[in-house]
Image (cartoon, helix red, strand yellow):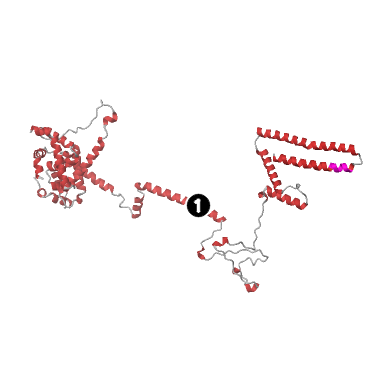
């Protein structure tokens, strides 16, 4: 330590003999002024409402300017919470009107009394709460059926039968057709030859779809072409249908000519057979068109 | 001629004066100011390098002593306590100054020809005209070394405090204080080579 001081002896002496800087002449006066200012500041920093009552003091502390943002935020949050709960409690009440509220089952078992379809109203009323005893009615007193939360798996009450009601607006076209058919069967009218019911339904559906397409689909060139093709097919069918008829008539004429009027009966039989043949060919043609 | 009470105050130690001031004797405070105003001004001026700033810092130091008189306890010397206050205030001032240094007026206006009324910082109240140059030169060298070294070198070599007192003031370990003082001296000697050649 002393060695270091001796090492820098010259430097130390230089620094030690540096001219001393003195304070300014008015140092004390300025210091006094500063001290007074500091004292004022110290007293000013203390709250100025010392003489106020405790309540006013508390209010003054609460509503001090530095607390304004916090107070504003608190008020806004409170309003938000109140509005939120008020609005949703209203919604909850509306829901409660339509729903049956089931409270907790802490109060005991939950009973459901099933209404029986019977003539007497008294049997529907729970006997536990009936003013008439079983002795008076002569009936055996039975306990009300209990239902546990897991009873939804149990079988339904056999006394009550569920009948499905088909509402008219929900009846499909298939069901309509079935209903119509059942009506026709009752009347004894055959709807269509030897064909199966499914085929008819399919056909009807396809026709319905075609109709729908015709109505709903916008005007198209392809549709026009389709129509033209359909016309052509119809014309071809008509020609094909007429051709065997003409042939049959010609054959009849030939037979008449050959056998004369006495053979009318035979000719009629032949006619019938030719007619049957033509009907068969017609049916075949129709099938082929449908397949196309 | 000083009064009886004044004579008694002159005889009191620093610690006795501050205790007297704590008891409400305002004259004890005045005595403390008279004892330390020049010492502190010299120290702070060497430390900060600006006379106005040093005056301001010393004033603040005495205000602090006046307001916080009750905080002094007899665990350390009064001189240590008051110098510690002055060092802390000077540090704060230096940090503030360093922050303001980043802003330059000429950069802001970008007009080199324009003149500004900037107060003259080169003013030093050194009485002796011959030592004015030497004092300015040493002060320039002191300003160039690190603030940590400068403070300790001034406390040890200018104000002539003991190592123990410096340790108390700064709160640094003895080894750190010694090493820093030596490094500070080394650097200062390098900067003041010209003066030593002349000598």
Q: Residue at x 73, y 34 (%)?
A: A232
Q: Residue at x 86, y 38 (%)?
A: A252
Does residue B29 appear in this view? no
Q: For this rendering, which residue is in front, B149 or A175?
A: A175
Residue reaching furthest to the front? A258
- Mark 1: which secondary structure? helix
Percent position (x, y) of residue A254? 87, 36
Q: Output the chain of dot 1.
A: A
Percent position (x, y) of residue A183? 74, 51
The quadrant the N terminus of chain B occupies is top left
Percent position (x, y) of residue B25? 16, 50
Q: Is residue B5 left or right of residue A109?
A: left
- What residue span does the magenta drawing correspond to? A265-271
The quadrant the C terminus of chain B occupies is top left
Q: For this rendering, which residue is in front, A235 or A272?
A: A272
Residue B56 found in image quarter: top left
Percent position (x, y) of residue A81? 45, 51
Q: For this rendering, which residue is in front, B42 or A262?
A: A262
Residue on which disc 1 sits: A88
Residue A3 found in image quarter: top left
- Asked whether A138 falls inside the magenta stretch, the response is no
Does residue A281 appear in this view? yes
Q: For this rendering, which residue is in front, A10 or A3?
A: A3
Residue reaching furthest to the right? A262
Main SS of residues in magenta: helix
Q: Is residue B168 left or right of residue A137?
A: left
Residue reaching furthest to the left? B199
């Amino acid at each position: 330590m002393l060695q270091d001081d001796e090492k820098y002896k010259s430097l130390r002496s230089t620094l030690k003999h540096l001219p001393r800087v003195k304070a300014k002449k008015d140092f004390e006066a300025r210091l006094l002024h500063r001290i007074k200012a500091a004292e004022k500041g110290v007293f000013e920093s203390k709250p100025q409402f010392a003489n106020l009552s405790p309540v006013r003091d508390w209010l003054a502390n609460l509503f001090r300017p530095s607390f304004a943002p916090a107070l504003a935020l608190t008020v806004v949050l409170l309003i938000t919470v109140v509005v939120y709960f008020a609005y949703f409690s209203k919604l909850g009440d509306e829901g409660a009107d339509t729903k049956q509220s089931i409270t907790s089952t802490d109060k005991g078992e939950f009973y459901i009394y099933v209404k029986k379809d019977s003539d007497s109203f008294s049997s529907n009323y729970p006997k536990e709460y009936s003013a008439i005893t079983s002795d008076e009615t002569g009936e055996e007193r039975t306990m009300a059926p209990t239902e546990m939360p897991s009873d939804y798996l149990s079988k339904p009450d056999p006394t009550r039968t569920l009948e499905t009601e088909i509402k008219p607006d929900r009846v499909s076209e298939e069901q309509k057709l079935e209903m119509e058919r059942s009506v026709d069967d009752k009347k004894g009218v055959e709807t269509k030859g030897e064909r199966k019911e499914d085929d008819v339904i399919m056909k009807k559906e396809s026709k319905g779809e075609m109709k729908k397409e015709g109505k709903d689909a916008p005007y198209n060139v392809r549709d026009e072409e389709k129509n033209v093709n359909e016309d052509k097919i119809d014309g071809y069918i008509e020609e094909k249908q007429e051709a065997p008829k003409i042939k049959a008539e010609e054959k009849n004429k030939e037979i008449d000519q050959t056998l004369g009027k006495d053979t009318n009966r035979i000719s009629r039989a032949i006619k019938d057979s030719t007619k049957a043949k033509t009907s068969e060919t017609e049916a075949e043609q129709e099938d082929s068109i449908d397949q196309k | 001629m000083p009064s009886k009470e004044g004579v008694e105050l002159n005889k009191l130690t620093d610690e006795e004066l501050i205790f007297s001031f704590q008891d409400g004797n305002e004259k004890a405070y005045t005595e403390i100011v008279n004892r330390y105003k020049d010492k502190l001004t010299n120290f702070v001026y060497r430390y900060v390098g600006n006379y106005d700033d040093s005056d301001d810092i010393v004033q603040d130091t005495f205000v602090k002593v006046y307001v916080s008189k009750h905080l002094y306890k007899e665990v350390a010397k009064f001189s240590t306590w008051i110098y510690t206050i002055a060092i802390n205030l000077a540090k704060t001032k230096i940090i503030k100054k360093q922050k303001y240094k980043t802003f330059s007026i000429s950069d802001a206006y970008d007009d080199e020809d324009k003149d500004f009324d900037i107060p003259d910082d080169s003013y030093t109240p050194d009485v002796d005209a011959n030592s004015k140059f030497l004092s300015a030169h040493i002060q320039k060298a002191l300003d160039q070394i690190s603030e940590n070294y400068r403070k300790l070198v001034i406390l040890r070599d200018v104000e002539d405090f003991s190592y123990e007192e410096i340790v108390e003031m700064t709160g640094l370990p003895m080894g750190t204080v010694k090493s820093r003082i030596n490094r500070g001296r080394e650097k200062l000697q390098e900067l003041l080579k010209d003066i030593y050649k002349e000598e």
